[in-house]
Image (spheres, grey):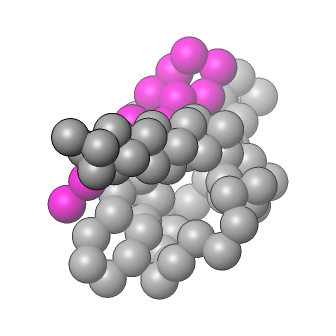
Amino acid sequence: MQQAHVYSRGILAGVLSKDSTGYQFQYLSDYLAQDSQEYPPISLNFPKQKSAFKSNFVSRDENLPNSSRWVLRQQHREKMIADRV
């Protein structure tokens, strides 16, 4: 399973993970417990909630928070480099 930490305003908000079934984003309980003004949702598409967001695929990376897009781009770059070696 691949995992990436997702930050909002420099504060760890949750974990994005990928396994054979797809993608999942889970807010950390500490982040959820904080005031929404100082600890906002990472995206309008990902409101603060206890249950995980799950998807079989990521259809368009514009729908992802910036940090998640970075993770996907980084994984793509690493694969391209590995393919060259």
Give the quarter of the image for residue 74: top left
- In front of the other: 69 or 12: 69
Q: Is residue 8 above or below residue 73?
A: above
Q: Is residue 54 above or below residue 14?
A: below
Q: Quadrant of the C terminus?
A: top left
- Kindly tell me whether residue 67 is visible in this rendering: yes
Where residue 32 appears, as percent x and y from the top left, is 52, 43
- Kindly tell me whether residue 71 is visible in this rendering: no
Residue shown at 56% from the left, 16% from the top: 10
Where residue 17 appears, as percent x and y from the top left, is 34, 57
- In front of the other: 38 or 65: 65
Numbered range of the magenta stretch: 1-12
Q: Is residue 3 left or right of residue 28?
A: left
Residue lying at the far front of the rendered structure: 84
**Dominant secondary structure, magenta:** strand
Residue shown at 61% from the left, 28% from the top: 8
Where residue 83 appears, as percent x and y from the top left, is 28, 50
Residue shown at 52% from the left, 29% from the top: 7
